[in-house]
Image: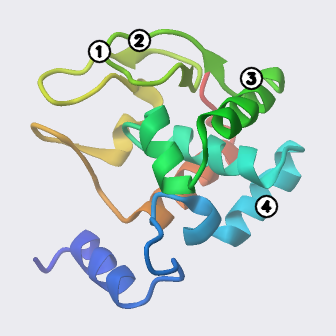
Amino acid sequence: LTSDAFKAFAERVKDSPVSEGGYEANPLQSVPKLVDKVAKELGVSKEAAALYLQTLALAEPTQLRVCQWNGWKPKQYKDVSTELVKKKLLVEGKRERAGRTLFIKGGYSKGAGKNLPMEEWKQPFYATLERHVPSEPCHLLFARAWKRVEDGDKPA
């Protein structure tokens, strides 16, 4: 309970910009400045930048969860997904048990037990336990994932 990761979670609980009833997993609320930066850098809408960050950083961004976190209807999710696929930032595909059709490029693990399939690129963000457990709060995961992209370590 004294690790830096635990302290980061505790600090975020004490001081979060996310509105009551919102979700840290929604970058539009948890890291709005980063969303603005990503949108500008990639030439996409803020919604597309948010979905890109979620797909880039979160272990299991199923369509159902993303719609819940972001307050989207399925049509909005589809429209935003299409924007990212057209820009070749994400790819559409099928992965058994994934609960989504949108992925970052590259290999993936099939997921075992309760874990859903997850792209290999984002595995360093998660502890290897029975479940994919993030090593830090969402706002830091989003920032770290984007930093990797900025540093040239893009999913491929």
Q: Amino acid at mark 1?
A: Lys
Q: Earlier in the sequence, mark 4 or mark 1?
A: 4
Residue wearing tag 1: 110
The residue indicated by pointer 4 is 37
SS class, disc 4: helix
Distance, label 3 to label 4, CA atoms, is 19 Å
Q: Residue at x 45, y 65 (%)?
A: 23
Label 2 CA crowd tier, 10 Å (few <14, some 14–19, many 20+): some
Marks 4 and 1 in Cβ contact (< 8 Å): no
Q: Is residue 135 visible?
A: yes
Residue 70 numbered tag: none
The residue that label 3 is drawn on is 85
SS of the residue at dot 1? loop
First of labels 1, 3 by sequence position: 3
Looking at the image, residue 59 sits to the left or right of residue 116; the answer is right
Q: Amino acid at mark 3?
A: Val
Circles 4 and 2: CB atoms closer than 8 Å: no
Report which residue position mark 2 lands on: 95
Q: Residue 83's x, y, as percent? A: 80, 31
Q: CA distance from mark 2 to mark 1?
A: 8 Å
In the displayed structure image, the side of residue 92 where residue 134 appears, left or right = left
